[in-house]
Image (cartoon, helix red, strand yellow):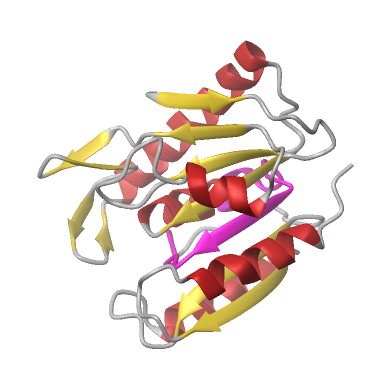
Amino acid sequence: MIHIFRQGSDSSKPTLVLFHGTGGNEHDMLPLAEMLSPGSSLLGIRGNVLENGMPRFFRRLSEGVFDEADLIARTHEVKAFLDEAAAKYGFDPARLTAVGYSNGANIAGSLLLHYGNLFSSAVLLHPMVPLRGLTPQPLGGVSVFIGAGVNDPLVKAAETKELHELLASAGADVTLHWSNQGHRLSAAEAEAAKDWLDGQSFK
């Protein structure tokens, strides 16, 4: 997968794996990641799917309707890439934090559901429920921050709450932060995510 890796200066911090929104690329999430966890190593990934020329991590059939077979296949594809990247760059695969926005948050959520503790923590910004009817892998010991908009036109509040319950039912420690900026990532939401991440214990 097309990506960028930046070696961090603080080995006590986790490696942040960055998943952009529709139309983004491997560089988009770097400024946010540098603010969230200064000193962390950063792995920015570009989605392999193009929708009208815009990169995404998986196909959709229409707005808010996912191609579930493609989502599952792409989830496994990203997992295989992460294994390869850990071997190539030497970061600890047991100390990863996912940071995803919109479509990127959805692929990160799918990775959590399929692989359990692949990530020790995750910052999911304006995610949807990636898959229904799937029994999640155990998420005990995994911490998740969900950033959501009360007036998000793409993700209804009920769906955000459904995702919260789904992850929590699998054992994740989930923090839900509401803003009133629609689907946009606001500075206040980013600060809340940073404060949350600062409070996590990484070993």
Asked whether residue 172 appears in the rendered view, the answer is no
Q: Furthest residue to the left?
A: 52
Q: Residue at x 28, y 80 (%)?
A: 153
Could you tell me residue 10's position as x and y percent? 79, 33
Up-down relation of residue 80 to residue 123 (above or below): above
Quarter that holds the C terminus: top right
Q: Residue at x 54, y 83 (%)?
A: 178
Nearer to the camera, 20 or 160: 20
Q: Residue at x 48, y 76 (%)?
A: 148
Up-down relation of residue 12 to residue 62 (above or below): above
Quadrant of res 64: bottom left
* Residue 126 magenta-highlighted: yes
Could you tell me residue 128's position as x and y percent? 42, 67
Q: Is residue 158 left or right of residue 54?
A: right
Q: Residue at x 10, y 44 (%)?
A: 52
Quarter that holds the N terminus: top left
Figure disc tally: 0
Up-down relation of residue 62 to residue 45 (above or below): below
Nearer to the camera, 90 or 29: 29
* Residue 178 magenta-highlighted: no
Quadrant of res 164: bottom right
Q: Is residue 147 left or right of residue 140?
A: left
Could you tell me residue 16's position as x and y percent? 62, 41
Q: Give the magenta range.
A: 112-130
Nearer to the camera, 111 or 95: 95
Asked whether residue 132 appears in the rendered view, the answer is yes
Could you tell me residue 75's position as x and y percent? 45, 39
Q: Is residue 164 left or right of residue 93?
A: left
Quadrant of res 92: top right
